[in-house]
Image: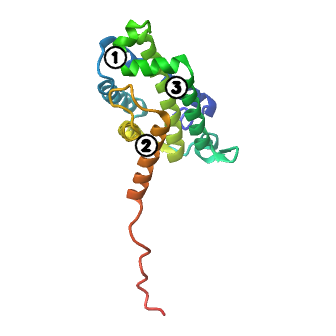
Amino acid sequence: MLMVVYQQPVWLAVLVGLALGTCWADQRMIVTRIKIFPLIATLATAVIFQGISYMVSQAKTYRNYPEEFLFFTKGKVLGLPFDVFLTLLIVILASLVYYETIFGLRIMALGGNEEASRLSGINTRRLRVVLYTLCGFVTAIATMVMISKANTTHSSFGPGTEFTALTAAIVGGISFMGGEGNIPSLVAGVFVLAVLGTACSSPVGGPIPSTSSEG
């Protein structure tokens, strides 16, 4: 809406989108304070914010974004499509953090046994808040890419994507309860799901024969 309706600069709209995704405190507070199971909190808050988006957008569809915004999927960096380059960058950074830093070890410990992590001196509540914040930031980036690729969006555009992400994680060997899995397997799960989705959506059979009597 900032770009299409209010004609604001693309960089400002992108920053606002990233800030909203990063700073939304709903799920973080629900999970860390009320201690509701994270998946339930995700589904519940998704319904709430979809309703808010209907109110804000008045259920309208927005399309024809500026070329600068379409750079997310049409632009190239180092010979690679920008969205592919962005994906590789995020995977590499996540791998470095996950495998090579104390923060990554604490994430694994938190997923494996939260109570043991707390007793060992890890501030589990703060760590959860940080993780949900990072997740919100990356989700905001993914949303920008999705909207740029479709060049259109509306209030029912996003819901349902979370199940695709969840399925890809499970196929990639990520434990539903946490504490197990690795990033290469997760990436493999995403590729498997993408290949299956492409295969299922491809037309079956060859070209339709011509009914012309010529020849």
- Tally the numbered discs: 3
- Residue 61: x percent and y percent? 44, 42
Mark 2, secondary structure of its residue: helix
Vertical placement of residue 48 versus 124, above or below:
below
- Which of 26/95 is in front? 95
Left or right, residue 88 beside residue 32: right
Left or right, residue 126 beside residue 87: left
Left or right, residue 47 beside residue 104: left
- Residue 45: x percent and y percent? 34, 25
The residue wearing badge 1 is 30
Mark 3, secondary structure of its residue: helix
| N-terminal label among 3 and 2 | 3
In this view of the protein, can residue 24 be seen by the observer? no
- Residue 211: which numbered mark, if any? none
Amino acid residing under circle 2: Gly
Amino acid residing under circle 3: Tyr
Residue at x-position 62% and y-position 42%:
82
Residue at x-position 42% and y-position 29%:
56
The residue wearing badge 3 is 98
Left or right, residue 74 beside residue 145: right
Q: For marks 1 and 3, give the CA distance.
A: 25 Å
The residue wearing badge 2 is 189
Amino acid residing under circle 1: Ile
